[in-house]
Amino acid sequence: MFVKSIKIAKRAMFPIFRWEQKGVSAQIGVAGTGFFINSNGYFISVAHVFDGRNQNTKFLFFGCLPGQLQNPRIEIREIARDDEHDIFLGKIELKTQNYFHLSIRIPEEGRSICVGGYPLAQISKNSQGGLELGGVRRYFQPSFVLDIAGANVDNGQGLIRKHDGFLVRDVGLFGMSGGPVFNKKGIVVGMQGSVTQPRISQHSSGRTISVENAQVIKSELMVKLLRDNKIKFNFLGKF
């Protein structure tokens, strides 16, 4: 069902690495996911991936892993953000022919979608003292739209953001924040924002099941940020 669209996602989606220098040592990990929206290296992610940075923090692009390793790494540059709706517009200094088209239409309830991201990253050092990134793997979660919805999310630092869009049945995993949510044609209709609070389904026998859903930020808000900053992108309104 998603064979064609996942081929697009594999070339246009990448992990965002957070590099924190602490004295003579450094900590590095995957903070979230970004995806290209044009050929000039502009990309979209969620703003909360970049929260809590300081003078010793860098956000880095190592390529569309695991297949396309970027050497040397490239530092990510912030262009603009919509903190109210948790949207980040960034740029990587490279040219690419692999990027997503966007739609401003929220898919109908029951419509099949797929969420992509990098939730299971394994990073180690090699014998030369560099990083071994072969364990940074993509993950795709097919799902479907449950309902039009929004949620207020606290970033833990006193900032409340509105994740405005729709719910999908299956949750994204940690590291998939900012990942593209796309339809069967490979058109982005939103991005992974957050997960709903657990709700309990309880049987008369006493058995309980915890239920969570993914909250998706609608692509209409991304389009607005791109237009406000006069960034070219490819727009497709139909499914």
Image (spheres, rainbow, N blue to C red):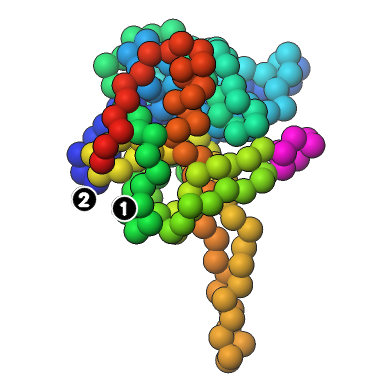
Residue 51 vs residue 101, the one in the foreground: 101
Residue type, label 2? Met
Using residue 225 as the reference point, say whether residue 206 is left or right of it: right
SS class, disc 2: loop
- Asked if residue 84 is positioned above or below residue 80 in the image, the reply reads below
* Mark 1 neighbour class, 10 Å CA radius: few under 14, some 14 to 19, many 20 or more: some
State the image coordinates of residue 99 (x, y, percent, origin top left).
32, 23
Q: Quadrant of residue 239?
A: top left
Q: Which mark is residue 1?
A: 2
Tell me if residue 149 comes above or below residue 228 in the rendering. below
Camera-nearest residue between 39 and 126: 39
Residue type marked 1: Ser
The percent position of residue 34, horizontal first and vertical second, equals 46, 28
What residue does disc 1 label? 112
Q: Is residue 69 visible?
A: no
Between 157 and 188, the one lying in front of the other is 188
Q: Is residue 17 left or right of residue 67?
A: right
Which secondary structure is most common in the magenta stretch?
Answer: loop
x and y, in percent, of residue 2 in the image: 24, 46
Q: Is residue 121 above or below residue 94?
A: below
Front residue of 30/44: it is: 44
Q: Is residue 12 left or right of residue 168?
A: left
| Residue 85 lies in quadrant | top right
